[in-house]
Image (cartoon, helix red, strand yellow):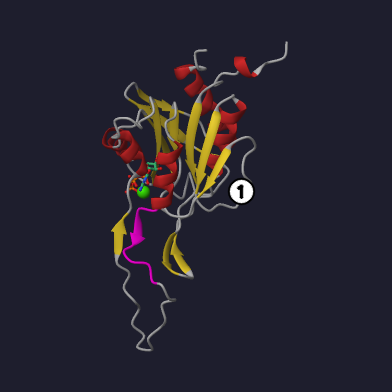
C-alpha cells in the first residue's frame, strides 16, 4: 500500500527548527562565531519533513544545502534569528538546535577597525544576546506545546541540562557532550541524552542523521499527526 500524506506520523503538524551558529558583526569585515556546523539541526528539519511535518528551518550561516521541502529562512545574528522564529510561530513543535552566539558586540563599528600603531589591541564591549529558547518558553501565546532545546556542555552535562530545562521552560533538552574527547562540534556523530521531567534517556553514539530520525520518531510518538 502506498503511504499517503495523511498517514505520515507528523502529517499536518508545523515544526520550527533552528540550526547553525549565529554570526555577530564586529565591524564590516569581522564577526564573532562558533564551531557549529548546522548538521544536527538541518538533519532534524529533513527528518521532520520526511515524516510529513510542515517545517520552517531558521538557520545561521552554514556550508550546507537547504534540506528539501522545508521553508528556509537564512539569518545571520541572534537578533535576526529571534525575529524569524517569532514570525514563524505558532507551531506544534519547536526545536532550538542552533548554537546561538551568547554575546554580541555592543555597537558594531561602521568602519573597519584599524590598528592604531601603538600595539595595543582594541577592546570589544560585549553584551548578552537574547535567549531565543527561553523567550519562547516563557511566552504565553507563542510557546508550542512541545518545546525542545539543546544543551552543549563540556562538563556537568546532566546538571547543566536539567538547569536549562527549568530555566528556559523547555519540555525536553537534548544534552550534547561537546568535550574534545567525545563530541567535537562540527563532526558527523553525536552522543546525546534526552532530559525531560520524566527522567533521562541515554542514546548511544549515533550519526547525526540517526539522532534526527530518533528524535523525530520520539516527537511523533508524543504528539502524533494532526487530528483531521
Ligand atoms: N539558546 C537560545 N538563545 C541563546 C542561547 C541559547 O535559544 N541566546 C538555546 C540553544 O539553541 C539551545 C539552548 O538554548 O537550545 C542551550 O544553549 P546553550 O548554549 O547550551 O546554553 P546557554 O543557555 O547559552 O548557556 P551556556 O552557553 O552558558 O552553557
Ligand atoms: Ca550558549
In the image, residue 67 lies at what x, y percent? 62, 40
State the quadrant of the N terminus: top right
User: Which residue range is magenta in the image?
Assistant: 101-109
- Residue located 35% across and 28% down the image: 171
- Residue located 53% across and 53% down the image: 61
Quadrant position of residue 156: top left
Residue furthest out toward the top: 1
- Residue located 39% across and 46% down the image: 82
Ligand 1 resides in the quarter of the picture at top left
Q: Specify the principal SS of the magenta part.
A: loop
- Residue located 40% across and 40% down the image: 86
The correct choice, above or below, for 204 with respect to 186 in the image is: above
Viewer-nearest residue: 214 or 103: 103
Q: To which residue does mark 1 refer?
A: 64
In the image, residue 117 lies at what x, y percent? 38, 89
In the image, residue 32 lies at what x, y percent? 42, 62
Using the rendered image of the protein, determine whether residue 9 is visible from the camera's viewpoint: yes
Quadrant position of residue 51: top right
**Mark 1: few, some, or many residues within 10 Å (few <14, many ≥20)?**
few
SS state under label 1: loop
Q: Is residue 104 magenta?
A: yes
Q: Is residue 60 magenta?
A: no
In the image, residue 7 lies at what x, y percent? 61, 14
Using the rendered image of the protein, determine whether residue 207 is visible from the camera's viewpoint: no
**From the viewer's perspective, is 75 left or right of 129?**
right
Amino acid at each position: 500500500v502506498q503511504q499517503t500524506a495523511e498517514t505520515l506520523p507528523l502529517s499536518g503538524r508545523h515544526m520550527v527548527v533552528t540550526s547553525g551558529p549565529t554570526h555577530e558583526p564586529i565591524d564590516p569585515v569581522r564577526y564573532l562565531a562558533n564551531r557549529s556546523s548546522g548538521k544536527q539541526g538541518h538533519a532534524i528539519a529533513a527528518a521532520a519533513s520526511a515524516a510529513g511535518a510542515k517545517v520552517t528551518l531558521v538557520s545561521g550561516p552554514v556550508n550546507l544545502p537547504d534540506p528539501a521541502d522545508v521553508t528556509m529562512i537564512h539569518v545571520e545574528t541572534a537578533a535576526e534569528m529571534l525575529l524569524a522564529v517569532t514570525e514563524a510561530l505558532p507551531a506544534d513543535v519547536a526545536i532550538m538546535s542552533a548554537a546561538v552566539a551568547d554575546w554580541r558586540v555592543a555597537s558594531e563599528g561602521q568602519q573597519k577597525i584599524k590598528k592604531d600603531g601603538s600595539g595595543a589591541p582594541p577592546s570589544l564591549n560585549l553584551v548578552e544576546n537574547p535567549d531565543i529558547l527561553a523567550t519562547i518558553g516563557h511566552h504565553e501565546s507563542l510557546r508550542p506545546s512541545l518545546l525542545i532545546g539543546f544543551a552543549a556542555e563540556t562538563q556537568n552535562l546532566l546538571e547543566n541540562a536539567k538547569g536549562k530545562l527549568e530555566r528556559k521552560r523547555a519540555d525536553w533538552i537534548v544534552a550534547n557532550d561537546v568535550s574534545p574527547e567525545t563530541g567535537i562540534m562540527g563532526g558527523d556523530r553525536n552522543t546525546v541524552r534526552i532530559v525531560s521531567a520524566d527522567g533521562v534517556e541515554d542514546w548511544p553514539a549515533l550519526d547525526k542523521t540517526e539522532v534526527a530520525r530518533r528524535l523525530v520518531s520520539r516527537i511523533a510518538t508524543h504528539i502524533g499527526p494532526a487530528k483531521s
